[in-house]
Amino acid sequence: MIRVAFATTEGETINEHFGRCGTFSIYEIGAQGYAFVHTRVFANGRDKTVEDTKGMGHIHDEVVEDKVESLSDCKILYITEIGGPSAARLVKRSIMPVKVKSEVKIEAILKDLLERIKTSPPPWLRKVLQSSL
């Protein structure tokens, strides 16, 4: 089983940018299926701590690093947008950031991931699955 995080404002749709996202829905998924684990809350609404420190160098970096650390048990993170430095931080922690082009239902992504895991996962997903063994 691997953990997957979804940037969401209401728990059903991937609809938020990594930095400003206040809540992430966390699921576990494996060949047998998937299950909701919990909602990880960074803020009610937008994460003002990240937003308000943007451009403040080291202070902002620490705030973003704390968020990445809090998500480090997840192997995949779905978002609508993410900055290059934040994406690099995630990858460094072996978390695969995946941008969706438009808002999409979490359930649809989970069903697609499950099908890919069961049939033939693309190279990036195969790497994630192997790293969780």
Image: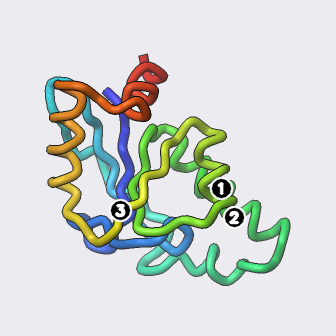
Q: Determine the CA span between mark 1 and mark 3.
A: 24 Å
Look at label 3 and name its amino acid.
Val
Q: SS class of the residue under badge 2?
A: helix
Check whether the beta carbons of the residues at disc 3 and disc 2 lie within 8 A of each other.
no
Given the current orientation, which residue lies at the most extreme right position?
58
Quadrant of the image for the N terminus?
top left
Determine the CA span between mark 3 and mark 2: 24 Å
Give the quarter of the image for residue 115. top left
Q: Residues within 10 Å of mark 3 (few under 14, many from 20)?
A: some
Kindly identify the residue that appears in the image at 42 percent across and 52 percent down: 98
- Is residue 106 shown above or below 83? above
Question: Looking at this view, is 27 or 44 the one in front?
Answer: 27
The residue where tag 3 is placed is 100
Identify residue type, mark 1: Asp
Residue at image coords 58%, 81%: 48
Q: Which quadrant holds the C terminus?
A: top left
Residue 64 in the image, given as x and y percentages of width and height: 66, 62
